[in-house]
Amino acid sequence: MSHLLDDPPHMLEHADTAAILRLLREHQTLLDSAGIGVALIRQRVLERCNQRYADIFGYPTPQEMAGISSVSFHPSRSNFRALGRSAYPFLSQGQTFKTERLMQRKNGRLFWGSLTGRLINPQDPSEGSIWTIDDIDEHKQAQSLLGNVMREKQLLFDHAAIGIAFYRDGKITRCNPHLEQMLGYRIGELQDVAPHCLISDTQAWSLLQQKNQGFLLHGLRFDAEVSLRRKDGTHIDCEIRCKLLDAADPTQGSVWILEDITTRKQAQQQLTQIQSRLEQQVRERTQELSTTVANLHREVQDRLQDQERIYWLAHYDPLTGLPNRTLLAQRSAAAIQTASDNSSPLAVIFLDLDHFKHVNDSLGHKVGDALLVEIGKRLRSAVRERDTVARLGGDEFVLLLPGANAQGAARVAEKLQQAALQPYQIERHELTIAPSMGIALHPRDGTDFDTLTQAADVAMYHAKLDGRNTFRFYTPEMQAKSLRALQLENALRRALERNQFQLHYQPQVCLHTGHIHSAEALLRWQHPELGFISPAEFIPVAEDSGQILQIGEWVLRTAVEQLKHWRGKGLGKIKVAVNLSAIQFHQPQLPEMVNRILTESGISPDLLELELTEGVAVQDPRTATVTMDRLNAHGIRLSMDDFGTGYSSLSQLKRFQIYKLKIDQSFIRDIDHDSNDRAIVSAIIRMAQALGMRTTAEGVETQEQLDFLRTQGCDEAQGYHFSRPLAASDFASFLQQYRLQH
Ligand code: C2E
Ligand code: MG
Ligand code: MG
């Protein structure tokens, strides 16, 4: 207000002018140096102002501002009026009006000013008013900045997904909603709560406290993991971070940031579990793998052992451990090759034990087996290292002697005989068993394995024929007997003990009733190498060699056992007809043997019929009659088989007490077109009727044959027309079926 002195007021006339002037000057200086703008406004026009006022509004000097309408200091006329409206009640009362307003500088820029106004004379507003202004723009900006910061902080505080609490003097002074929510409290409920009430474990709290103090006092941040108790009593895992609000003044308290890490911890635990489970699985898998590898290793070992075992089984006899036929054949082939290459001798000895079957039958297979093992050892020790002792099966051994000529082979055979004199001690039995041996020489008797062993076998057979316990060299004369017969004879020797026989049954049909009351037992022989051999072929061989006795007894026993079995199965009253060889028939013990078999099995004698051939009667009619009488006395019926092919006389037939005639199939075969045969067949039937005998026609194959036989009064028929001979079980089913249909 530099104009004050330039324009002295007219009231100075009574006062000490100098003093007033001085006072004015002092005021002027005061105003000029004031840090606040001061202006005199009269009638809405600035009359005077100080330098600061000019500075604030952007004018170079106060003089330049004089006369300016005070409206221009405001952003708008409405602003200006609003100020007037709010100021008036104060000003008119003579009070100071204070406000903070947006003002406008000369250059148009707005700024915040702090205004005070007062009328010079409240009684007369026209005298004007004094206004002071302070530029508070910077302060205002700082304030709004602070406000923003505060708002931001509040927002963060209110919406952070993390718990925040301020702690001071042992309690929570403030906390955010998230913390309350986290702990299950309502808004405001945690205010003034002591934190230890929230910590699950008091011990954990005091530990936390101690650590906390230590850290915080050093101005450090403090982290901890702690379990908190929610309002509902459940627990959550939290990670807590603490920091003093003012490191210089711990009494200001601290801020706590709490994060719920329950899920994270659970996930971590799950992860750890999964990891350990995985590790466990890996361990188990590794273990499994190593077991598998070990098993594989063992399996490979086993396979190798199996292979060795298979090889062994294929080449050695399991009982004695001696080479078997296969290995013998291999070694023989090699030895024969060497013998021919070097023109060196070679002998084969076929050895069969005499009456070994007897040992087996009377002392049992165990003793028999043990004996075979010992014999094997003794044979082995009697020959040289390079010789082969093989067991072919049963009681048959073959010795392959490379380099041995006739003399050498004979020496070996004698040595074996000598050795056999020494009894064998098997369990508590002292056994002596002699061998029969046949010797074949290479190349004289054969140049291959089969021929040589067969020749040796034939020679052995002759040794047996010549009284056993001896040896024979093979000679071509021995072959005189048909090779086939020899083969069969040899094979027959083992057929019984090797179970190669079987009985088949052919039904016999009654022509009056059409029923089947009986069956004929027919022997079947299936040889592993020779195949099926017809009884018509092997029965004569067995008769020649005497083996028919054993075989015949087996047939009888088996047929009777079968009868018993069928009866047990409810097949009813069925008879069985068994063929008897003439040789059997001439055995004086025959009737007792038959009777014994029947008694043993409890089968009634009238269910057994024996078929004889005409030859029986022709050879020795007197003894035949005695035997037949004895059989008849036992109640066993006899029939004459193949009737018409032999030479039996009618008178003889009458004496024989024959119950039935079986008309040979050679007559039946041609009855359809051969009138002679028809005449013979009808004569046989009539003759039999006259003698009180029944007739059975054999080999009936057609309906025509059957019709003719029926008209002739034949009693029974048997033949393919009804059935071929059947295995026992097939026969039973056939019979059941047949009975259903007839
Ligand atoms: P066989 O006692 O006269 O037996 C009848 C033979 O005729 C049987 O031959 C039988 O299969 C056959 N046959 C049955 N029906 C017909 C047919 O309709 N047409 C033709 N073509 N043949 C038929 P298989 O079984 O070959 O027996 C032959 C002979 O061997 C028997 O004649 C018998 O003498 C004898 N035989 C069979 N088994 C034994 C037995 O256990 N002991 C004795 N000692 N000899 C037996
Ligand atoms: Mg017969
Ligand atoms: Mg016959």
Image (tube, grey):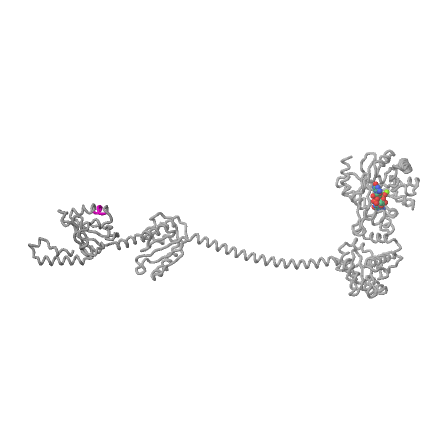
- The quarter of the picture where the N terminus appears is bottom left
Q: Position of residue 125 (x, y in %)?
A: 14, 47
Vertical comparison of 710 with 406: above or below: above
> Magenta stretch mostly in which secondary structure?
helix
Query: Toward the viewer: 527 or 16?
Result: 16
Q: Is residue 82 magenta?
A: yes
State whether residue 428 appears in this view.
Answer: no
Query: Toward the viewer: 136 or 476?
Result: 136
Q: Is residue 12 magenta?
A: no
Residue at the outermost top position: 711
Q: Position of residue 499 (x, y in %)?
A: 78, 50
Q: Which corner quadrant of the image does residue 422 belong to?
A: bottom right
Residue 168 falls left or right of residue 30:
right
Q: Position of residue 550 (x, y in %)?
A: 83, 50
Total label count? 0
Vertical comparison of 677 with 46: above or below: above
Which residue is depicted at the point 33% across and 56% down?
254
- Which residues fall within the magenta stretch? 79-83
Residue 186 falls left or right of residue 376:
left
Residue 521 falls left or right of residue 110:
right
